[in-house]
Amino acid sequence: MAGSATAAAGLPARQIAAVAAGNAIELYDFVTYAFFAVQIGRSFFPSDEPAVSLLASLATFGAGFLTRPLGAWVIGRMGDRRGRKPAMLLSFVLIGVAVIGLPLVPPYASIGVAAPVLVVLLRLLQGFALGGEVGPSTAFLMEAAPLHRRGLYIAMQAMSADFAVLVAGLVGMALAHLLTPAQLDAWGWRVALGLGAVIVPFALVMRRTLAETHVPQLQPAAAAGHGAHPLRLALLGLAMLAAATTANYVLEYMTTYASTTLGLPERIALGATAMVGLCGLCCDPLSGWLSDRFGRKPVMLAPWIVLLVAILPAFWWLQHAPGGPVLYAVTGILTVASTLCTGTMLVSVTESLPARIRSGGFALMYALAISVFGGATQFMLAWLIRVTGNPLAPAWYMTGAALLGLFAIVQVPETPPVKVGPRPA
């Protein structure tokens, strides 16, 4: 089968980067949008009430999630029927159009209502492309990996995304220090988003050199889930991905939360995003390596329980002692616990699916989790804080998601790692 030699030898670093580039650009663009949501809101959704402008901006942020299931259905299934490579090329071209287009849209003051309409259309296109991106690329990494390194290889996908989050945070901090608030409103956020578009042509060229790992007509019709019922397995996988997505977007909301709810300066608040990226960058490969060595479930359970216990005390501490050191400590603690688990969740769900539906099945589960939970999270957090007046609302929201994730982790069957035999003396 095509790609078997690749799997035996392992995937070159350059090709891992090409596969993971779509996920990296997704997180860079989405995180940059999230922590410049205030400035983007004022640019495209001007209002006399700042909270209304912010909610409109976050609703547009969430609009990008509405078309993810459609993209997962169309492009994800294309990855199963025609191969991983053509699906990844199509999704990346569409991602490039959306990522390049958004920072070029004129403000509301220049073109009126056409500005928010264009922004929403670009978010919908990007959501469609990203919905179809994750399935083929994750399936490709698993199929190209040595059998005993599947966890580590799939973790590279998450690692690239957290590297993008780190870069986004550093770019945001630099711009906040170098520019005035008026300059950030006028064009600073456009610079931040535009930097993500620079990588698009280079990553597209690299993707064209990838080998194919999936030849549809040669795939056996194997059952999924190591004997587990496919529907039950899909629901458990969806619950795990929903919990992981919610936790992730709560953490990425920390910059907006610190700025709008706690009243911290933007130059301090933006450091929370950099902390999320830095912790993820370190913990993603560790999570994959540990899951290859000790199994998927132990590496999911232990840190997730720590996360569940830590959420409310961490937010309480931040509310009563707002400031840079506490913000970064809280963000770091919660991100480490979350990331050590969520990287392995991706491995567990992907391994449980047979090759013939791996791309489309994983894409659809991921897209539904992202659309229903991820897309709504930041809007819901802002709305809950405004309605209840309780700054601990994000903690309760995140705790609910963590409980759902814990239930699913306990119920999901183990997909044991492949051990390497002893080396000859």
Image (cartoon, rainbow, N blue to C red):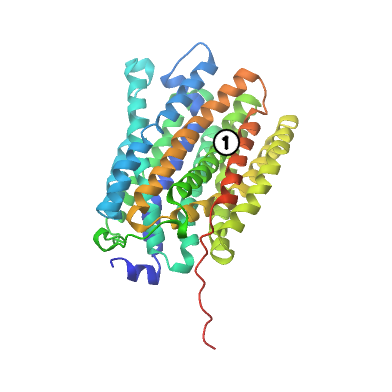
The image quarter in which residue 210 lies: bottom left
Which residue is depicted at the point 65% across and 45% down?
A: 307
From the viewer's side, name the closer residue of 189 and 209. 209
Which residue is depicted at the point 75% across and 32% down?
A: 321
From the viewer's side, name the closer residue of 9 and 40. 9
**Is 334 placed left or right of 93 in the picture?**
right
Residue 103: x percent and y percent? 37, 31
Q: Quadrant of the C terminus?
A: bottom right
The relative height of residue 120 versus residue 174 in the rendered view (above or below) is above
The relative height of residue 351 versus residue 248 in the rendered view (above or below) is below
Residue 247: x percent and y percent? 57, 40
Observer able to see residue 202: yes
Residue 229: x percent and y percent? 45, 52
Q: Residue furthest bottom?
A: 425
Query: What element does badge 1 sit on?
Result: helix
Which residue is depicted at the point 52% across and 86% down?
A: 424
Which residue is depicted at the point 74% across and 35% down?
A: 317
**Residue flagged by tag 1: what amino acid is it?**
Val
Q: Quadrant of the N terminus?
A: bottom left
In the picture of the structure, the residue carrying the numbered disc 1 is 250
**Is 231 placed left or right of 296 in the picture?**
left
Observer able to see residue 179: no
